[in-house]
Image: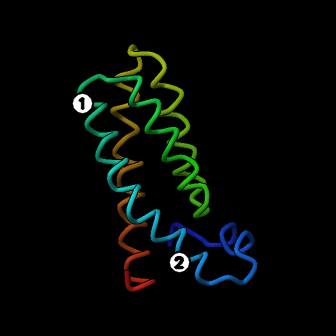
């Protein structure tokens, strides 16, 4: 398991509906953000690369995915400069693999 719910549980203060709500939002929004990020990278749309990586970062952070958060931060920072295309393309597959794995695990763990 590459996620943990410690941050969400702390925020929820025992509210299971809140936890489920955060996870549901993650499962609804992040796959589309990831797809849009992949498209932006392919199109060389670095403003969008920056914005989408910035949007994904807090979502993975909430799930305690520290390595994935660090990769999103790197892509966000690299997205400020089109000269970083190769670096972004090298880092994105790791981000995508981690996020897709967590989406799958969350779906199974919470029957969503």
Q: Along the line of sight, which residue is nearer the eye, 82 or 86? A: 82
Looking at the image, is mark 2 or mark 1 nearer the viewer? 2
Q: CA distance from mark 2 to mark 1?
A: 33 Å
Q: Label 1 belongs to which residue? A: 42
User: Residue 10 occupies which quadrant of the picture?
Assistant: bottom right
Give the left or right position of residue 8, taking residue 44 as reference.
right
Within 10 Å of disc 2 (Cα), the crowding (few <14, some 14-19, many 20+) is some
Q: Residue at x 54, y 46 (%)?
A: 57
Label 1's element?
Answer: helix
Q: Mark 2 vs mark 1: which is more N-terminal?
A: 2
Rendered view: 46 above or below 31:
above
Q: Position of residue 89 (x, y in %)?
A: 33, 32
Rendered view: 45 above or below 18:
above
Q: Along the line of sight, which residue is nearer the eye, 86 or 50? A: 50
Q: Residue at x 29, y 22 (%)?
A: 44
Q: Are marks 2 and 1 in contact (CB under 8 Å)?
A: no
Rendered view: 66 above or below 79:
below
Q: Position of residue 103 (x, y in %)?
A: 39, 67
Q: Label 2 belongs to which residue? A: 20
Q: Residue at x 75, y 78 (%)?
A: 13
């Amino acid at each position: 398991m590459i996620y943990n719910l410690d941050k969400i549980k702390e925020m929820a203060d025992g509210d299971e509906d809140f936890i489920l709500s955060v996870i549901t939002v993650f499962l609804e929004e992040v796959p589309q953000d990831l797809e849009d990020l992949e498209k932006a990278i392919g199109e060389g749309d670095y403003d969008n690369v920056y914005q989408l990586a910035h949007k994904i970062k807090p979502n993975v952070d909430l799930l305690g995915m520290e390595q994935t958060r660090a990769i999103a931060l790197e892509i966000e920072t690299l997205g400020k400069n089109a000269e970083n295309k190769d670096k972004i393309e090298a880092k994105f597959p790791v981000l995508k693999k981690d996020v897709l794995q967590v989406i799958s695990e969350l779906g199974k763990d919470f029957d969503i």
